[in-house]
Image (tube, rainbow, N blue to C red):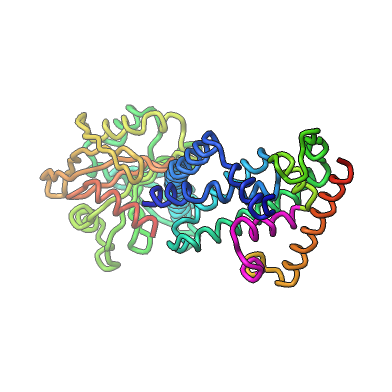
Amino acid sequence: MKKFDEQYKEFYDNIKADDELKERILITCLNQKKKKELKNTFWIRRTLIAICSILIFVIFSSSIVFANEIKDFVKTHIFKMELNEERSNEENKDVYTFTIENPINEKVNCDTDINEEMSVIRKTELEEKLGIKLLTSDFYENDFYHVNIIEKVNNQLAYANFSRDAITKENSFFKEDVEKQIFKNTKLELNAIFLTPYATEEIKNNRIAIHKYIYNNEKFEVDYISSLGIDVYFAPLFIMSNESDIEIINIAYFIYDNVMYSVTGNFVSKNTVLDFIKTLHY
Amino acid sequence: MKEKLFTKIFNLYVDDIYRLVFSYTHNKEDTDDIIQKVFLQFYNHITELDKDETEIKKWLIIIAINECKDLFKTAWKKHIIPLQENMTFKDNKMENQFAINEDFKYYLNKLKPKYRLIFHLYYYYGYNTKEIAKLLKIKENTIRQRLLRGRQILKIEKEGENEKV
């Protein structure tokens, strides 16, 4: 008679995991490694996608904020313009009196006359080509902005050209000197076409063509600024100075957040455009 | 490295752990499932474990016991009666002693799993009551009592069968 413990051992010795089970466990366990690796790469991929999405979102949202700030900036500086009077001076030049309101200076009155020497095309010719009424004005505001062309459509401001300049109060008394100084000393000049809410469809459609015609130059170099996502059109600009010699400076056009800008200066490049946007942003 | 160690330990202990789990469940399908879970856990924690083989064996035993207990805690297990427990494998050839494996299994089936577990650790692995107590985190006296009670149950069963014969 066998003892219980011997019988017990004998009984359990016969019990074994079958080969099929062993094989299955080995395969399952060793597959775990592959699964883990796959899981790891999956998480890495997911994390990368998430980071990229956040970056895209941040860039996108900041560019929206950026664009809105530019828009707000422009809107707060040129707020509203009213034509008070249109007359001719002794030299038979058209003279306009404007009231320009802006949030900083409230109401500012200014007298201006047509300055035909400033561009290579006459105002009347330009009006004819564009089929719209153009008003030209010089306006000094805190010696900071210089508006030399203003286009009015249905009593609303549609186009403004103003330069950021370091003109002092002393020399601003002498208009001609100031003009000369603007083009000689101004590093950058900003033109802004307000496509909304002021501009007409005509302006929107012809915004590039207009400028091409104004400066009588067909050769525009197009460059893409990836950080802003815009095309910039570069062209030389011919300026006739008071001494009647022609000065060539560069001009760049770009449309940013529904506002068209043109930047002029001696050395206008992609970086100039970026600097200008930064300045506006500031 | 990890795979090598795993394969080595697996080949070394798979049968032992299988027997232990079987002693608790007395059911091939449940045993298969639990064994797979135990070794999966082992594979996932292999780097954290001590390299000492006996320690690994103890770890495997503890995991196996916990898995068994978990299985019996499930509502499903609580409400079903395994088919083989209801079936009698006895026949006229059965002798007085536990001669046939199925008969031996039948008698062991009379014990509750908690008794069978201690029987296995005691009779098969050869652990003493102190070691079993440490392993199962139960008082040594309880282990002794369960061994005694288990033996009594088996004795009663055996005597009952003898009387029938």
The foreground one among A63 and B4 is B4
Counting from the top left corner in percent of width and height, residue A48 is at 42, 47
Q: Is residue B112 left or right of residue A101?
A: right
Q: Residue at x 81, y 49 (%)?
A: B158
Give x and y (percent) for residue A206: 37, 29
Q: Is residue A255 above or below residue B148?
A: above
In the displayed structure, B131 sits above or below A265; it is below
The answer to whether residue A67 is visible is no
Quadrant in the rendering for residue A210? top left
Q: Residue at x 70, y 46 (%)?
A: B25
Q: Quadrant of residue A203?
A: top left
Residue A186 vertical placement versus B40 (above, below): below
Is B127 a magenta residue?
Answer: yes
Q: Is residue A20 visible in this depiction of the protein?
A: yes
Between residue A115 and residue B62, name the one nearer to us: B62
Task: Check if residue A201 falls in the magenta segment.
Answer: no
Across and down, in percent, residue A263 comes to 28, 47
Residue A85 place in picture, x, y as percent: 45, 47
Magenta stretch bounds: B113-133
- In the image, what residue occupies the spot 29% across and 30% down? A125
Q: Is residue B132 left or right of residue B160?
A: left
Q: Quadrant of residue A146?
A: bottom left
